[in-house]
Each structure stands twice: as C-alpha cells, then as structure tokens.
Image (tube, rainbow, N blue to C red):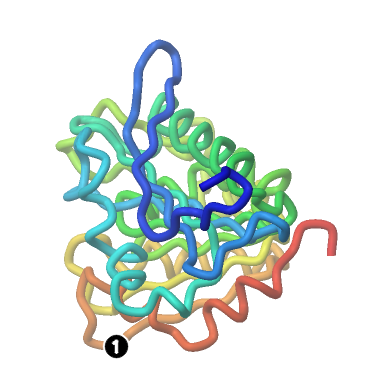
C-alpha cells in the first residue's frame, strides 16, 4: 500500500534513542484510534527499581503498562516508557537525558501536543518524577503524578545516586521542592502501609506544597502497601484530571 494509505501502527512499539554515544531501548504506546492529523497528549512514565535493564520491555509489565494491557481504551495518550539501566536510578543525569530524549522523539514522531505533556512514575520512578519536576516541570510538563515516591536517597544500596534535593545546603528539601515546582498541578498517591517507601515522604511533600500555595491533590490508600500504583492508575478521575491540565491555561 502507498504510505499515505497505510493504517498507523498502534499498541506497544519498539523504539531506540541514542544519547552521548549510548543506545537505549524503550517502548511507546499508541492508542488504537490514533490519527496524525490531530495533536495528542503525551505521558512520560518512569518505572520502578525491579524493571531496570536494557531489554526495553520490562517496564511495560508494571504500573501504567499493566493498566494499558487491561484498559487501553481508557488512556487516550501517546505514552513513552523509557527503561532505566541496572545500577542506575532516575535521578542520574544520563538516565534523565535518555528519558527526555525519548519523550522528544515521540512527540515529534506522533504529533504530540507540547502543551499537554504529563510526567508520572512509581517508587524509583516516583523519586525520579520529583527530581525531574524540580528542574524542568514549569517549562515542560502540564502536570505530574508521583506514586509512592521519596525525595531523598535513603537507601544505603544506592549511595552514588544523590538527587537534586540531597544537597546538604538545602535544609528543608520538601519546602525547596515545593518552591521549585511552583503551581504545577500535582496529584500524589501513596499506600498508608507502604514498608518500602514510607508514606511520610508523600505526607511531608503534600504538606509542603499546601504551605507554599501549590496546586496539589493527595490520595492515600489505607491498608495498602508499596503497590499503590494499580489503584492510582485505575482512579476513575485521573485521566479526566490530566486532560484538564494544559500549559498556558
């Protein structure tokens, strides 16, 4: 068939991006009703620690990827899913660079709407969401959704991965993060019984954002452990809330 008559590929698609001489595999999800004539909202999804690697696939089996396999029609977005390398975290500069490069590539390839770009992540990716938001949220993202994320590098197993807020000169990292993200719309999720990332991380961040006059929502699930992401991505109002957020409104 001539190129103009072909139906665009949809679903999970394999992609690669090259940054600083290294090639990274990732996935992009394209809705079944995709058409290039319209601009599409875009989500950048950051996975957790267990999906690190270089196969470009594992990150689709958890969180937003898992939700898409069951309820794809509920998510009318281009969804970019980079993969963090083993031994790295989403606060590392090279991992953030490859994630943002993948995002830019898919915005260009699939006619993404730069006024409707959203950032979300769970656990390790929740921490990455806060870290990226503290530097670039105001100019790039219309909203962020951190799920069971922490602000600090509390884990002794990751001593070489200080985040933006681990600077000893910052006396109150929660207040400083709130100041940096400003009034970007934020919806935080956490399980009250999380024994991997303390719920106090999200409680403190929520309080700091409220004190700073931020635009923030917080949902805490009683009795839920570390996996609060399945409930979060199944929230009936989440997609509607995201689509209501737009840069320049």
Q: Quadrant of residue 193?
A: bottom left
Q: Which residue is mark 1?
A: 222
- Residue at image x 65%, y 72%? 243
- Residue at image x 31%, y 52%? 47
Q: Residue furthest right?
A: 249
Asked if residue 133 lies left or right of residue 161, the reply is right
Q: Residue furthest front?
A: 1
Q: How many marks?
A: 1
| Quarter of the image with the C terminus in it | bottom right
Q: Position of residue 100 (x, y in %)?
A: 52, 36
- Residue at image x 28%, y 56%? 60
- Residue at image x 52%, y 57%? 7
Judged from the image, the secondary structure of the residue bearing numbered disc 1 is loop
- 154 and 22: which is toward the camera: 22
Q: Quadrant of residue 184?
A: bottom right
Up the image or down, 18 lies above or below 130; here it is above
- 3 and 28: which is toward the camera: 3
- 66 and 4: which is toward the camera: 4
Q: Position of residue 52 (x, y in %)?
A: 21, 41
Q: Position of residue 225 (x, y in %)?
A: 20, 75
Q: Position of residue 155 (x, y in %)?
A: 21, 43
Up the image or down, 230 lies above or below 52; here it is below
Mark 1 Cα-neighbour bin, 10 Å: few <14, some 14–19, many ≥20: few
């Amino acid at each position: 068939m001539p190129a103009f008559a072909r139906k665009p590929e949809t679903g999970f698609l394999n992609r690669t991006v090259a940054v600083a001489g290294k090639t990274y595999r990732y996935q992009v999800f394209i809705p079944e009703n995709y058409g290039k004539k319209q601009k599409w909202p875009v989500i950048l999804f950051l996975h957790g620690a267990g999906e690190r690697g270089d196969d470009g696939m594992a990150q689709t089996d958890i969180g937003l990827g898992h939700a898409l396999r069951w309820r794809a029609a509920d998510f009318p977005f281009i969804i970019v899913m980079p993969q963090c390398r083993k031994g790295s975290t989403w606060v590392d500069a090279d991992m953030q660079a490859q994630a943002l490069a993948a995002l830019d590539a898919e915005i260009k390839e699939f006619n993404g709407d730069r006024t409707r770009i959203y950032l979300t992540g769970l656990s390790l990716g929740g921490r990455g969401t806060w870290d990226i938001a503290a530097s670039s949220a105001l100019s790039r993202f219309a909203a962020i959704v951190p799920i069971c994320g922490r602000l600090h590098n509390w884990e002794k197993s990751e001593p070489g991965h200080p985040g933006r807020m681990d600077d000893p000169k910052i006396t109150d990292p929660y207040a400083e993060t709130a100041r940096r993200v400003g009034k970007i719309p934020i919806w935080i999720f956490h399980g009250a019984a999380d024994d991997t990332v303390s719920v106090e991380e999200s409680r403190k961040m929520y309080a700091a954002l409220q004190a700073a006059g931020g635009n923030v929502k917080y949902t805490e699930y009683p009795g839920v452990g570390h996996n609060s992401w399945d409930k979060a991505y199944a929230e009936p109002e989440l997609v509607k809330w995201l689509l209501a957020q737009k840069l320049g409104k």
